[in-house]
Amino acid sequence: LTAEGREVSRGRDLRIHSMGGSTVVALRIPAQSINAGDYIVRLTGRTADGGEEDVASYSFRVLRRQF
């Protein structure tokens, strides 16, 4: 999501992996699909009854360098 709440990309049926003693979820987003700015990754899980439940959210900033 952008900082304003607009959805940029959505991963579906992601799986957890163990990496270096931590549990991780890997998501690839094509660089050209996001512009410089602030973003929020919202991680949700599927409940036993098929609903969605928020698990965590992470914010990050994209900077574009001119070469």
Image (spheres, grey):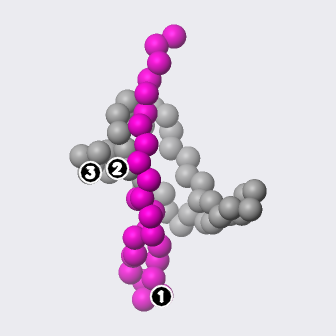
Q: Residue at x 50, y 39 (%)?
A: 30
Badge number at residue 28: none
Q: Amino acid at mark 1?
A: Ala
Closer to the N terminus: mark 1 or mark 3? Answer: 3
In the rendered image, which residue does mark 1 sit on?
48
What range of the chain is rendered magenta? Answer: 42-67
Quadrant position of residue 16 = bottom right
In the rendered image, which residue does mark 3 sit on?
5
Q: Residue at x 37, y 30 (%)?
A: 36
Circles 3 and 2: CB atoms closer than 8 Å: yes
Q: Amino acid at mark 2?
A: Leu
Task: Find out whether residue 59 is within the magenta segment.
Answer: yes
The x, y position of residue 42, in whole percent, is 41, 59
Task: Find out whether residue 5 is within the magenta segment.
Answer: no
Q: Residues within 10 Å of mark 1 (few under 14, many from 20)?
A: few
The x, y position of residue 64, in whole percent, is 44, 23
Q: Nearer the viewer, residue 22 or 12?
A: 22
Circles 2 and 1: CB atoms closer than 8 Å: no
Badge number at residue 1: 2
Of helix, strand and loop, which one carries label 1?
loop
Q: Residues within 10 Å of mark 3 (few under 14, many from 20)?
A: few
The x, y position of residue 56, in whole percent, is 44, 64
Q: Amino acid at mark 3?
A: Gly
Q: Is residue 32 visible?
A: yes
Of helix, strand and loop, which one carries label 3?
loop
Of helix, strand and loop, which one carries label 2?
loop
